[in-house]
Structure formats: structure tokens, C-alpha cells
Image: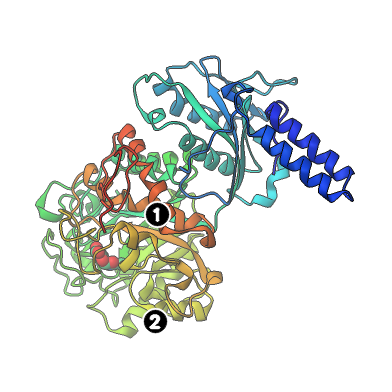
Amino acid sequence: MKKLQKGGKSPSSRYFRILIECAHELGRLRPLWLLLLFLAAACGGRSDDLPPSDEPVAAPDVIIPLPVADTPTGQIFTLTEDANIYISPEIQALREIGEYLVDRLRPATGYEIGVFPRPEDDLPIGSICLALNDEYTSLGEEGYELTLTREQITLSSSTLEGVFRGIQTLRQVFPPSIEESTVQPGPWEVVTRTVRDFPRFEWRGAMLDVARHFFRVEEVKRVIDLLAYYKINRLHMHLTDDQGWRLMIHSWPNLASHGGSTEVGGGPGGYYSQADYTELVAYAESRYMTLIPEFDMPGHTNAALASYAELNEDGIAPPLYTGTAVGFSALAVNKEISYVFVDDVIREIASLTPGSYIHIGGDEAFGLSDPEYREFIVRIDEIVQSHGKQMIGWDEIAEADVTSPSTVQYWLHAAHAQTAARKGLKIIMSPATRAYLDMKYNWCTPLGQIWAGFTNVEDAYTWDPAKQVSGVEEHSILGVEAPLWTETIQTLEDIEFMLLPRLAGYAEIGWSPESERGWDEYRIRLGSHGPRWDAMNVNYYRSQRIPWAFEESAPVVF
Ligand code: NGO
């Protein structure tokens, strides 16, 4: 951990150190050592001879996800209008991260902060330095060290991802009004500290179902920004289901033009052009987040079946579907045309997907026999791999003869997750009873479903992925993902209401050391994020379990 920088100690603590050192010299004279210590403490505790700025300042606990190590150092750094960001080395990707930080700081401060290469000599007082440095490789792909002193802020990592994740920590230690979109009075003071941090799991995801209700590119970008604030690094997009097909596939254009033309409740639906999707991929990448595309099959395929008659067992296209039942549709798995179809879809999405994973759904194919289902999944796995990608599927796929690197997403059936673990497959943990963002918080929640039970903010936080299913241990777990299914979710405000505050908890489960997490402490830290969400102008559920920071004496209701 970095030492406190020059000038970082108050005069009283310097005297205190000298006394301690003397005491060490005189180590054998124990009584004298104790006397000196007593005197030092008594003198150090006097405040009337010190300017107020030298008093150690308490650092509020506000960072979510909780960092691995966070050492407050008791002073104040003030961001002023002369501040600039210095980057080292001078490379485009680090400059872009610097500009991302400028974009976060400029609206509320009004300061014209620039991004410059780091000078040879000392940095000006009040600077922020972003540094890529091999010294930090031990912190892994996303780890970083953030050091705030009275003079400057230094954020170091061996990777760009690490610098980006550290910036989210830095945003959170500023006053909440830093997130406002108009100029605020400040002052922009932060308490000094050193944070050394890295994640528990490599996969920290959220899922957005754009099939049941369609969400525009701008709305998805807003979700990406919220996820990034909590260091989420995967956005799984559920692109197809019975009610809608949401991506243009050039070799099968009716999928989007017809299959995307409605949604639950009969609204107009919509779809992404490939240019739209590419824009989303790039936007997510600029937030060091990977998009995971899902085409759900062989069940949940009514929109495709309605678009092409030949994909149906009886050769007859059903009507479009705008209800919310599940499990009634299935591709004609005994017809070769179905595999031509899947190959085309996977080829097109693979060419738009820089990430290594493609999700093929695989859930609730109730219309097929078990052997039919298993054979289909094995063929789809081959197709996905033939396009250079790895398959992910909901937990039912564990019953098919698939091998690593295919990956299983546990949602409901413990036995499937146990089978996956036995086969050595990696597992993403999304237990519906804990991690489904579409479950209501309680009876009064106006949106969402209840089939997996209520999931209040505490339920969403108080579980450990490595203890959820017996026989599925930490080494089998790739990470955590919280899916938001949108049967009842129609607007961005609805999405935000179901995401927040629970998302923050999922992020912490995925990132922070399990031994350090605790509800009683977390709920207070979470309460400090209410004013941040207000400043960002995002909607959220004001759970009465949380002592929101803006409520002077918040009632605690359980
Ligand atoms: C299930 C089902 C989805 C529903 C969701 C609603 C899975 C993997 N399949 O989860 O189609 O939308 O529940 O909570």
C-alpha cells in the first residue's frame, strides 16, 4: 500500500512519531516508553494549538462495491478550477478514460478540466493522475490503487479496465452533487484515503430483456452507464422471445420486421438495426463492459415461428403473441432448415460480437422430448463453436452432452447446477429467488412478478453465490448476474425502479470479499447513494429498510 505522501502529516503527528522513535531507542526502559507515549497522546490530543485543517477528518463509508482495502488518511483534497488530469503513458485509450472522467466532473463543477500527458517534473497541486503501471499486475485484470492526498489524486492500475473501475470509486467519494448535470456551488472536497481493490468474480452481470418490451438505444445506454457506476462488466441482452425478435438478421429479415413489430400488451415493439447494435457494443466497450447477446431457442421462439412458416413443425406460421405465458413454442428441431436458420443467426451475431460468449437460451422448451432437447443443444453448441464463440445457456442445458467451455446460467434448478459443476462447466449464478430483478420488493410494488417470491433489498444482498447450491462451490462459479425480465416493465423509469437499490447489492456480491460484507453496515452505505441517484435523476425504490442519507432521522421499518 502506498505511503502517505510528503506534507501529508500534521505537525502533532510528526512529534508523535519522533517520540515513538525515541521510545524505541530506549526500548529497554519500558516505564519511560509508556510515560512518553502517554505524554504524546495527551499533547497530540490538544486542538487549541492547531489550525482546524490539521484535524483528521473522518472518511464517510460510501463506496459500493466495498473495496478490498480502504485506508482513510484524514485530510482533505479539494478539486479547484485549476485542476487537470494527467495521464501516463500518453496513449489514446488512457486519454479517452481521462476524457470520460472530465465528462463526469465538468457538468456539476463547471470547471474546464483538461487531459494532458504527465510532465517530467512534479505534478501541480490539485491534479488527478491516471497511470498505467506494471507494478500493479498483482491486482489482476480489473484491480487498481487509488491514492488521494491533500495535494493530488493518483489512480494506478496495470490495465485500462482497472483505471476505469477506479474512476467509479473516485466518483463515489466526491459529494453526491458531483453527479448533477448543472453547475453546483461545491466546494469539491474529498477526504483523503488509499484504496487498493480488485474483484472477487470476473463475471459481474445484469440482463435486460428487450424482447417482452423493447427499449431504444438511448435507453440501453443509460442502463449501461448505471451498471458501470457499480463496476458491472457484462450486459446480457435477451434479444428474442415469444413476444419479439429485436435484432435485424439480414439473411432472415422478417424476424425483425415482422417478429419485432409488437411486444407484451400489443405495443409497437421495435428492433435494432445491426448499426444500432454495433453502437451499443461500442458504447458498452467504452465502459469496459461486454455485451452478451442472447437468442433464446428452441423454446421461447414464437416471434421467429410467426415470421417464417418453415421453422414450424407443421409448416404453418402462428400469429404474433403479446401475452406473458411461457413454454408453449418450439423450433422444428427435426427439420434441417432450423439448423440453417440457427447457423445464419449465429454467424451474423458472431460477426457483431467482440466478446467470446453467445447465449442461446435453452430454457423451458416444454414442447420437446428430453432426447430431442438434448440433441438440439449439442448441435447448437457445435454451431456456436464453429463461429469461434463459446455457448452459454440457462441451467437446463447442463442435461445435454455439453463440455467446457460451454457455460451454464443457474436460475431455477439446483440439480442442473450440480450436474454442471460435476461436469466441470463454469456456472453463472442468477438464482430467481435472490437475483431476479423482476420480482416485486413486496406486496405494494406496482411492477414485477411474484412467482419466485418477493425480493426485498435485504434478500437481494444477503446471499453468497458459493453457498447458494450445495455442491456448487466457488471454483465452479464464473460470477453473478441479475436478470431484469420485462413482462411488466415498460419504460426506463420502470427499469430504474426495479434495478435500484438492488443492483448495488448484486454488484457488491460480485466484487467484494465475502468476509467483509454485512447487511447492517451495507444498508447505511447504501443510504448514502440515494442522494447520488437523485443527482443523476434516476428513479429508484425508496425502501424503508434503508436509512437514506437525506432523511435527517430516517425511520427504520422492517
Ligand atoms: C424465467 C423464464 C423467462 C421469464 C422469467 C420471468 C427464465 C430463464 N425463463 O426465467 O422467460 O421471463 O422467468 O421471471
Dividing the picture into quadrants, the one containing residue 277 is top left
Measured as percent of width and height from the top left, residue 122 is found at 72, 21
Q: Quadrant of ligand 1?
A: bottom left
Question: Relative to 111, is 384 above or below?
Answer: below
Is the distance from the Cβ of mark 1 to the nearest ligand 1 atom less than 8 Å?
A: no
Q: Which mark is on residue 158?
A: none
Q: Which mark is on residue 415?
A: 2
In front of the other: 488 or 23: 23
Question: Relative to 420, is 290 above or below?
Answer: above
Please indicate whether residue 27 sits to the left or right of residue 5 in the image. Answer: right
Residue mark closest to the camera, 1 vs 2: 1
The quarter of the picture where the C terminus appears is bottom left
Q: CA distance from mark 1 to mark 2?
A: 26 Å
Dividing the picture into quadrants, the one containing residue 55 is top right
- Which mark is first along the chain, 2 or 1? 2
Q: Which mark is on residue 505?
A: 1
* Image mark count: 2
The quarter of the picture where the N terminus appears is top right
Measured as percent of width and height from the top left, residue 537 is found at 29, 34
Residue at screen point 31% across, 61% down:
436
In front of the other: 386 or 525: 525
* Dot 2: element: helix
Residue at screen point 75% across, 20% down:
121
* Dot 1: element: helix
In front of the other: 192 or 484: 192
- Mark 2 belongs to which amino acid? Ala
Question: Relative to 199, is 280 above or below?
Answer: above
Measured as percent of width and height from the top left, residue 117 is found at 65, 23
